[in-house]
Image (tube, rainbow, N blue to C red):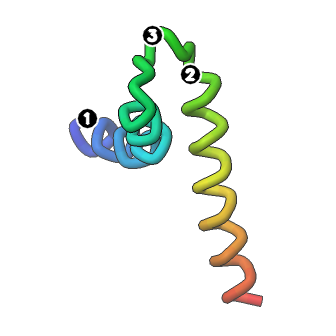
Amino acid sequence: MSLLRLLLELFLYPGTLVLQKCGISIEDDGGLFRSFINMLVWGTVTLGVALLIL
C-alpha cells in the first residue's frame, strides 16, 4: 500500500508544489488549479517521451 501512496504523491507533486509556492491551500483550490498544473506537466512529459520514441 505504501508503494501506491508514493506513486500518488509523485503524480500529484507538481501541482501541489505550485499551490504551495502560490500560497494556496488544497482545500481552497478544490483541486482545479492543481489538476491543471498536473495536466500541463505530465502532458509535456508524455509528449516528449512520445516524440523521442517516434
Q: Amino acid at mark 2?
A: Gly
At mark 2, the secondary structure is loop
Classify 3 as above or below 23. below
Question: Badge 2 is on which residue?
Answer: 31
- Which residue occupies the foreground of this view, 14 or 22? 22
Tell me the quadrant of the picture where the C terminus can be found. bottom right
Disc 2 to disc 1, C-alpha distance: 23 Å
> In the image, which is nearer the foreground, mark 2 or mark 1?
2
Task: Give the labeled residue for mark 3.
Answer: 27
Residue 50 image position (x, y, % from top left): 72, 77
* Mark 1 or 3, nearer chain start: 1
Residue drawn at 68 percent across, 57 percent down: 43
Q: Nearer the viewer, mark 1 or mark 3?
A: 3
The x, y position of residue 20, in whole percent, is 37, 32
Res 31 → quadrant: top right
Task: Please tell me the numbered disc located at residue 1.
Answer: 1
The kind of residue on which mark 1 rests is: Met
Q: Residues within 10 Å of mark 3 (few under 14, many from 20)?
A: few
Percent across and percent down for residue 2 are: 22, 38
